[in-house]
Amino acid sequence: MICPHCLKTIDDTETFCPHCHGYVGSASSSEFVFCDGCGARLSAHDRTCPKCGRPAPGILSVESASSDLAAGRTASFPRLTKSAIQTEAPQVEPTSAARTLDDSVDPSATNVLNLDDIQRAAGVTPQPVGEDPYHPARRSHARLIGVLVAIAVLAGAASFVVYDPLGVMPGFYDSFKSAAREAFPSRQLAETGSASVSAPAAETEAPSDDDEGRVLTDDEVYVRVTEAYDQLAAYDSDEVIGEVIDSFNSYYLEPDLTERTERSKSAYELRDAVQQTIDDLDAIVCEPDCAYLEDLEHVRQLAEWFMGRVDQICASWDVSLAIPEGESTLAAQDDILQPMREAGSSDLENFDAHFYEWDPRSR
């Protein structure tokens, strides 16, 4: 026959399989075997009860003990009776979590303790939600530190500008004034109050008779030189020299002599104003060791260069105005422009190259 456990062919007379030592019983046996634990009917080939898992009665017999022990399939379970089962099984009350909740129960009727209420009653400050009670988070002062650092930087920058420990701010102020004077010449004219666009000849009041021949102090020399420098800046604006150049370019070939005469007035008035500035500079009397003597010479040279620019325009106007009414000015164009060609652009180039460099500075 075939062993039901290892499926190997064995003798029909064998009670236990010689290969797996399993109980095969007698092929001719028709008696029933019952489980000692639950009383279920077992097959002659069952080793354990399929219901309760207890060993079949045959494996606890004397004959099968040695083979079962060698196979490692022995088990010594006591025979359980119904009374033993009832007395040994503890009666456990169902827990609250196992109870089925009824939705009809009023939540307010339940006696649930609140942790915050318990801590307040005990005088303990409740911990915020999400905070570790054993390692409380420290408050960050990064924002406060950043604000204090920004205030310190601003205060340091303001102190540097006000006290100027490195002595760099006067030069910065002077360069800023020069840039402003170059960018907005018309505003510089209004601020100095020394000239008007419509009447450049009336620049400043001439020195009084009391000042004539008097030796001026350094501060007075600085004031006079600065006023002359500001006058030259006003003359060099688009409203003054620009208007003179535009009038010449537009009307020096005008056939109408009256119109030419009227348009040439701005050039002659500007030449008179520049000459007055030169005369005022020449009238300054100062000490040989005056701190502003070099500034006086520089501004005097700037005035001379500017006078050269205006004088060549006036010389060309002289030729244009000398042409009688009715004669063609176009035929005399080369003669009109000849004074400007002879003078060239050296005065203009020298003036522009040194004007901002020779700005008088207080010492």
Image (spheres, helix red, strand yellow):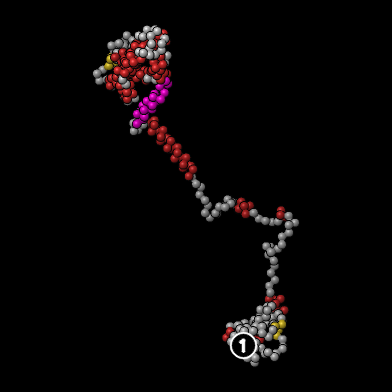
Residue at far bottom of view: 13
Label 1 amino acid? Thr
Nearer to the camera, 274 or 135 = 274
Q: In this view, does 148 lie above or below 44?
A: above
Residue 185 is drawn in which quadrant?
A: top left
What residue is shown with label 1?
Answer: 9
Q: Is residue 301 magenta?
A: no
Identify the residue at horizontal 48%, vertical 42% (top origin).
Answer: 144
Nearer to the camera, 284 or 211 = 284
- Indicate the position of residue 274 as horizontal and vertical percent values: 34, 15
Instruction: Tell me which segment is drawn in magenta.
Output: 168-188
Q: State whether residue 262 appears in this view.
A: no
Q: Is residue 187 magenta?
A: yes
Q: State whether residue 43 appears in this view.
A: yes
Q: Is mark 1 on a helix, strand or loop?
A: loop
Identify the residue at horizontal 58%, vertical 83% (top origin).
Answer: 72
Nearer to the camera, 79 or 15 = 15
On the rendered image, what quadrant is the C terminus found in? top left
Residue at far left of view: 288
Q: Main secondary structure of the magenta part?
A: helix
Identify the residue at horizontal 51%, vertical 47% (top origin).
Answer: 139
